[in-house]
């Protein structure tokens, strides 16, 4: 080799060897964390550049292709990186209601079964945690997983029989964390922070305000000891409800085989609701009874006890015959990794918000929005009820059915961005739990729709909101947020009447006004629910009539509310919303 080429060749060889060494170290000792980080940051830079360069008025006719291209790039990163990135992508898919339609259609694949890891890797995790192999710990251990998710997979096993002899041990579900998750998690969360920071700066949208809260719950979700404690607390709260404890069951934890990366719980023979619709339900279970149990369960968590399961997708809900009466059904709730603990203040305010929405009490809605740092009361109401709500006449850019030019479409998307940016006036005041509570409600709404909307979900939720306010009539008065009751109403004792009759008369009139207002408020609320029930049953009757006499399908009640939301959205922005975006 000529001398002049020797030095560059050596330099290239050193660079190649260094790159190969770094790659090997990253892959075999860091679970490819560096590679995944580079892939993510590269994609982020390309996405920012793509939108900055191509989201322009003179390129409005190519905006749809731009959204498709960016959504596909994000999906590719999530699928190639796997692990927590699957959860990140699912979060994007869940909130695709505020994103262009292209995101929804592309991101749906992230809800499919996640890749499995080999039994050898599962064996290593169990040996590391318990000092013995699965075959030594259990009587039998199925090597093929029954379910695989983004961070863990589940195997069926059987406990060993008691040393005293007797029957074989019970069957259990062993949830094992995929070994790369522990190494990747902090890398991934740090990269997520950097990506969100970059996107927030690039597009002038509030994105980072809830990041710390979400990251804390992600860390809790991958700690299986925390999940086991969540399951037991949820079970103890469930036991306090005499109705729900008969129709809902939470599997018992086997603590001797539970640690931060392995959780062992009672095995339940049941049918997942993932691919089960109303026509496929077993004869012991009617759709209305099933959905009433499910909606009541989560409404009770949201409005009464404040400990909320935030991942109630159909795969985490099983159906089985009731062990005590096979002619009845029982709902089994699994996967307790993601819960939020509502503060009592937020829970009460949320109950008050639901009450105010049904009473059209704009003053109370405005007060709650101010307390939460929300600048758009109508949007908050729509997100709460998951149906359109407006306290004013629509002022849309275009009328329904108008032809939309490409330039107008561009301007509409800018208007949507502006409304999203202005939704929160003070991000520090907004209750972060609302994000996860909304996730729960959206998934339950989607399940009710999939079952044909056999119940009026909104009514069930509203009744639990009323229950969450408690028996104190002050919560139903117009002064429920004030201190009038204790501070100004004074003393109604006999001595007060004798010494201060005029003041006591004023106090008595205050009490009378309070009694009247609170009862009127309560019964107006109940009348609103009754009117909604009438609407629901009239729609069900019309739906049945169309199906049996005209062989024509009419959308179920959830679909009707979705269509109404789409029309309201179009009136506000002139932009036709794809109602499939509301699917969880």
Image (cartoon, grey):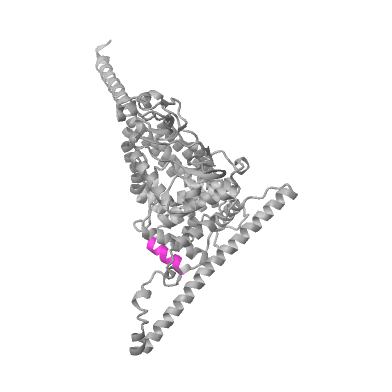
Q: Residue 57, how many percent across, how many down?
A: 50, 48
The residue that appears at 43% across and 57% down in the rendered structure is 304
The residue that appears at 57% across and 48% down in the rendered structure is 449
Q: Give the quarter of the figure containing the N terminus.
A: top left
Task: Give the answer, above or below, for where 306 lies relative to 167.
Answer: below
- Magenta segment, which residues? 363-372
Q: Is residue 376 visible?
A: no
Q: Nearer the viewer, residue 429 or 179?
A: 179
Q: Residue 547, how many percent across, how many down?
A: 70, 48
Q: Residue 454, how many percent across, how many down?
A: 60, 51
Residue 365 counted in the magenta span: yes
Residue 176 counted in the magenta span: no
Q: Nearer the viewer, residue 272 or 242?
A: 242
Asked whether, in this view, residue 120 is left or right of residue 14, the answer is right
Task: Give the answer, above or below, for where 106 lies relative to 568.
Answer: above
Count of marks placed on residues: 0
The residue that appears at 53% across and 60% down in the rendered structure is 389
Question: Residue 218 occupies which quadrant of the picture?
Answer: top left
Residue at the outermost right position? 549
Task: Give the answer, above or below, for where 175 lies relative to 291.
Answer: above
């Amino acid at each position: 080799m000529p001398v002049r080429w020797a030095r560059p060749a050596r330099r290239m060889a050193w660079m190649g060897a260094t790159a190969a060494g770094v790659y090997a170290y990253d892959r075999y000792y860091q679970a490819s964390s560096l590679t995944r980080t580079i892939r993510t940051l590269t994609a982020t830079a390309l996405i920012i550049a793509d939108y900055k360069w191509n989201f322009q008025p003179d390129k409005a006719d190519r905006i749809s292709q731009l959204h498709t291209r960016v959504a596909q790039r994000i999906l590719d990163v999530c699928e190639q990186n796997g692990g927590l990135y699957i959860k990140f992508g699912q979060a994007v898919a869940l909130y695709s209601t505020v994103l262009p339609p292209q995101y929804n259609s592309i991101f749906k694949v992230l809800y499919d079964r996640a890749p499995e890891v080999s039994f050898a890797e599962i064996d290593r995790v169990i040996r590391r945690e318990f000092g013995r192999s699965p075959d030594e710990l259990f009587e039998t251990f199925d090597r093929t997983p029954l379910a695989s998710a983004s961070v863990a997979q589940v195997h069926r096993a059987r406990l060993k029989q008691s040393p005293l002899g007797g029957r074989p041990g019970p069957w259990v579900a062993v949830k094992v964390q995929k070994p790369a998750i522990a190494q990747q998690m902090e890398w991934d969360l740090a990269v997520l922070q950097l990506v969100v920071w970059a996107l927030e700066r690039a597009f002038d949208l509030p994105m980072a305000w809830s990041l710390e809260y979400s990251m804390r719950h992600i860390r809790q979700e991958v700690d299986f000891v925390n999940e086991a404690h969540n399951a037991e607390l949820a079970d103890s709260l469930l036991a306090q409800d005499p109705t729900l404890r008969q129709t809902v069951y939470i599997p018992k934890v086997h603590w001797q085989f539970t640690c931060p990366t392995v959780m062992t719980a009672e095995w339940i023979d049941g049918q997942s609701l993932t691919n089960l619709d109303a026509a496929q339900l077993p004869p012991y279970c009617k759709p209305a009874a099933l959905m009433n149990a499910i909606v009541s369960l989560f409404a009770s968590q949201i409005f009464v006890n404040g400990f909320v399961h935030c991942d109630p997708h159909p795969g985490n809900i099983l159906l089985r015959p009731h062990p005590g009466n096979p002619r009845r059904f029982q709902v089994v709730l699994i996967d307790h990794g993601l819960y939020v603990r509502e503060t009592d203040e937020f829970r009460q305010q949320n109950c008050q918000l639901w009450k105010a929405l049904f009473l059209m009490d704009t003053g109370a809605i405005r007060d709650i929005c101010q307390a939460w740092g929300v600048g758009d009361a109508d949007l908050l109401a729509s997100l709460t009820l998951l149906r359109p709500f407006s306290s004013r006449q629509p002022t849309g850019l275009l009328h329904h059915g108008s032809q939309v030019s490409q330039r107008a479409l561009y301007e509409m998307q800018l208007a949507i961005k502006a409304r999203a940016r202005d939704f929160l006036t003070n991000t520090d005041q907004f209750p972060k739990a609302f994000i996860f509570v909304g996730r729960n409600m959206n998934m339950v709404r989607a399940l009710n729709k999939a079952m044909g909307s056999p119940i009026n979900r909104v009514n069930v939720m509203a009744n639990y909101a009323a229950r969450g306010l408690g028996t104190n009539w002050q919560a139903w008065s117009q002064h429920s947020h004030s201190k009038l009751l204790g501070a100004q109403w004074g003393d109604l004792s006999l001595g007060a009447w004798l010494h201060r009759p005029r003041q006591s008369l004023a106090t008595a009139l205050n009490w009378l006004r309070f009694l009247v207002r609170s009862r009127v408020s309560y019964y107006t609320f109940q009348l609103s629910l009754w009117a909604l029930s009438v609407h629901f049953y009239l729609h069900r009757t019309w739906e049945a009539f169309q199906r049996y006499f005209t062989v024509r399908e009419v959308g179920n009640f959830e679909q009707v509310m979705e269509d109404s939301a789409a029309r309201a959205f179009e009136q506000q922005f002139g932009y036709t919303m794809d109602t499939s975006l509301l699917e969880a």
